[in-house]
Image (cartoon, coloured by chain):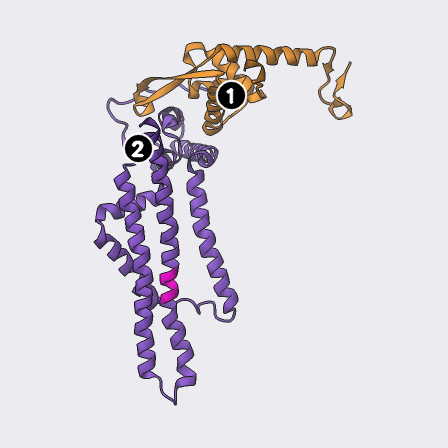
Chain colours: A purple, B orange
Amino acid sequence: MRWPQPPLPPGPLPPDMQPPIISQLLLEWVLPDALQEPVLGDLQEEFIQRQHRNRQRACWWYRRQALSTCWHFLHQTKGDWLMFIFSMLFFIGISVWAMLVSAPDDPLAFYDLISLVLIFPPAVLFAVGATSRQTLQRAIAFLFDPRPGAQPQDYQQVRHFFRVMGNSGLLLGLFSTLIGAIAIAQQTNGGNFSETFGPATAVCLLTLLYGAALKTLCYVVAEKVRFVADLSAQPHQMQS
Amino acid sequence: MTQDKFIGELEQMLLLCVLQLKDDAYGSQIRSFLADKAQRDLSIGALYTTLERLEQKGLLSGRLGEATAERGGRAKKYYSVTGEGRQALFRSKEALEQLWQGLALQLAPQFDQGGCTR
């Protein structure tokens, strides 16, 4: 059904006539490159017709269309990314499950804020320090859209970033564990051994656990970067 | 091979829409034409998934057209039915006609008592 509509103002559309921006961004992220122009154009064309009747309904219509379109194309364009994210979440989920099973009475037994602060921020800072802020941006962009097609040196830098972050995490874990072990050794005596040694050692080992977890995740991401880089290099190799 | 290219009901409908719309067959028009004539309200995603599949099968060909202001400066993608597409449509029509031969469909209220008679 086509409805009569008043002429559009010249130039770019005013903001109050634009479709919902988040839905547009989602579509741009999910749709294959070849279909972005026709699909987004068709949606906008119909959206403008609908919003002359009722803007709110037109926005809901656009959002529904965007979700439905993403559902149809997600597995096609983002299947590899979904699998990658699923593997990460699976690892995290299994680890959390193992922790909960190990200490059913105390769900927060494996949580220690100080250990987290000792591992994650320094590891990220070391990685940025060893590479650059642009590499950090590329690394984050890669996590959201690990498609082939970038320059080989970009992949090399992103892979280097994750390798530095993973190795730093593990080394920081070992370093922090040593600090904890020294502190335990200094402060433990015959009087308080049975009360303090166990809990203190557990907290001390948590930093090593967090470091090892970060290293594991970064190893998988670095290998993913290598895989995508190899995929990107294949057409060039075939041409040469 | 053309003989191997079977088409489903939706594919058949879309090929017919493209034929009916002639030079004006692009996504939005195909969608509204299908809704008007066949009361089938497809989402844009479902429409383009099927159009892409038909293009990959070689039954449709697409070309980018002009960009307009109401499309936010984005180009339309016009579709046309290829020779193979026309053959597939014709074969599908013939097969359906063969299957329908000698049958008369009874609709409600006798629908639940066996719809077809000879």
Question: Which amino acid, by three-letter code, is at mark 1?
Answer: Ala
| Residue A210: in magenta span | yes
Q: Residue at x 73, y 18 (%)?
A: B106
**Label 2 secondary element:** helix
Query: How busy is the neighbourhood of tag 1: few (under 14 within 10 Å), some, or many (20 plus)?
Result: some
Residue wearing tag 2: A16
Q: Position of residue A18 (x, y in %)?
A: 32, 31
Quadrant for the C terminus of chain A, please.
top left
Q: Position of residue A131 (x, y in %)?
A: 22, 50
Q: Residue at x 26, y 40 (%)?
A: A153
- Please give the chain letter of the residue carrying mark 2: A
Query: How busy is the neighbourhood of tag 2: few (under 14 within 10 Å), some, or many (20 plus)?
Result: few
Foreground mark, 2 or 1, reads 1
Q: Residue at x 40, y 80 (%)?
A: A197
The residue stretch that appears in magenta:
A208-212
| Residue B102: in magenta span | no
Q: Is residue A99 visible?
A: yes
Question: Which amino acid, by three-letter code, is at mark 2?
Answer: Asp
Residue A18, placed above or below residue A138: above
The residue furthest front is: A240
**Label 1 secondary element:** helix
Q: Residue at x 41, y 10 (%)?
A: B23
A96 sits to left or right of B93: left
